Amino acid sequence: MLAAFCCTLLFACSAITGRRLSHLVPGTQANLTRLLIAATLLGLWSHFFGSGLHGPAFPFLFASGCVGFGVGDLALFQTYPRLGTRRAMVMVQCLAAPFAALAEWVWLNHSPTLPQAGFGLLVLTGVGLALMPAKNEPQPGTGLAAGFFFGTISALCQGGGAVLSRKGYAVAAAAGAPLHGLRDGINAAYQRMVGGILISAAFFLYLKLAHRPQAASKSNWAAGWPWAAANGMLGPAFGVTCFQWALMSSPTNLVLPIVATTPLVVLPLAHFIEGDRITRRAILGGLIAVGGVIGLTLSK
């Protein structure tokens, strides 16, 4: 579970940098840029020291990247400015876990045990309790319905992408080439990245051909480049490497509830960087979620 915990920390840092980036650069440009930065780093390692774009798992990892990185992250970057960092992370992370568990049960015939399901639900309950905004907190002004729509799409794609990766690892193991460890995690993250870049680049090209001058006028790359570089390394590069590493050895019903605690890690970061207030309800929800995570790590 070490990989899942590292992934959680890296994704939390990525969420903060992603929110900052979304205010400086349009979401489609920001998503494509951070993926290109991450792909450059991972690709150099993969082609020199790994297997590049080869292996029995590649078709499924490529499809996982198209779904999770491509469509899912495009939707997430449309959710951030409409719902805010905390609401977006709560919605996407908490919905992705049950979506993925259901898909893995139906497709891969892997269902969680009763204790695992219970502790997973406890984690999601704690996260939701901790991070749902209070009634007296400022509510999103406009675009609330669109934010929930994009958030749901992102959650479906994040969960579906995780299950596609699990299928790829099962195919590789059946072919006598099992994947495990950090080395294979880096290679898997790169293979997923290729699919994500393809979808993101296609959508970016569509916007260019559709002539959207208002999107270009909002770009502030002078201030956005440092945030794009940080986001690309923390999330798509290092974070997803740990995520794939975790999925190689554990099912989605164990990995995704742990990763769903990412918003709890976002809390102190958002407090110091964005000025968000940490409430007693947040502390209580955090304790509940941590208890669920401990139960998950010990359950069979």
Image (tube, rainbow, N blue to C red):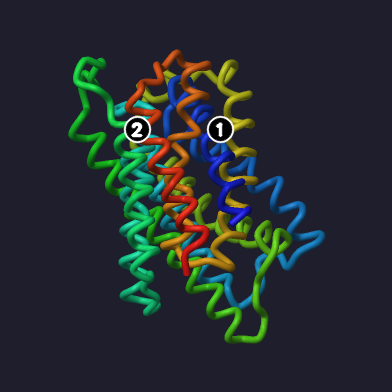
The amino acid type, in three-letter code, at marker 2 is Ala
For the point 43% across and 60% down, the residue is 161
Using residue 143 as the reference point, say whether residue 9 is left or right of it: right
Compared to residue 31, the image places residue 227 above or below, namely: above
Q: Position of residue 51 (x, y in %)?
A: 73, 68
* Crowd band around label 1 with a 10 angstrom C-alpha radius: few (<14), some (14–19), many (20+): many
The residue labelled by disc 1 is 13
Q: Position of residue 195 (x, y in %)?
A: 51, 57
Q: Quadrant of residue 113?
A: bottom left
Compared to residue 197, the image places residue 77 above or below, namely: above
Q: Earlier in the sequence, mark 2 or mark 1?
A: 1
Query: Is any part of residue 123 visible from this angle?
Result: yes
* Crowd band around label 2 with a 10 angstrom C-alpha radius: few (<14), some (14–19), many (20+): many
Q: Nearer the viewer, residue 221 or 249?
A: 249
Compared to residue 52, the image places residue 81 above or below, namely: above
Counting every numbered tag in the picture gives 2
For the point 70% across and 59% down, the residue is 182
Separation of disc 2 and disc 1 at Cα?
A: 18 Å
Disc 2, SS: helix
The amino acid type, in three-letter code, at marker 1 is Cys
Q: Position of residue 221 (x, y in %)?
A: 56, 21
For the point 41% across and 36% down, the residue is 286
Using residue 50 as the reference point, say whether residue 95 is left or right of it: left
The answer to the question of whether label 2 and label 1 lie on touching residues, with beta carbons closer than 8 A, is: no
Q: Which mark is residue 130?
A: 2
For the point 76% across and 52% down, the residue is 44
Q: Nearer the viewer, residue 40 or 290?
A: 290
Q: Nearer the viewer, residue 121 or 181?
A: 121
Q: Residue furthest bottom?
A: 175
Using residue 186 as the reference point, say whether residue 131 is left or right of it: left
The quadrant of the image that shows the N terminus is: bottom right
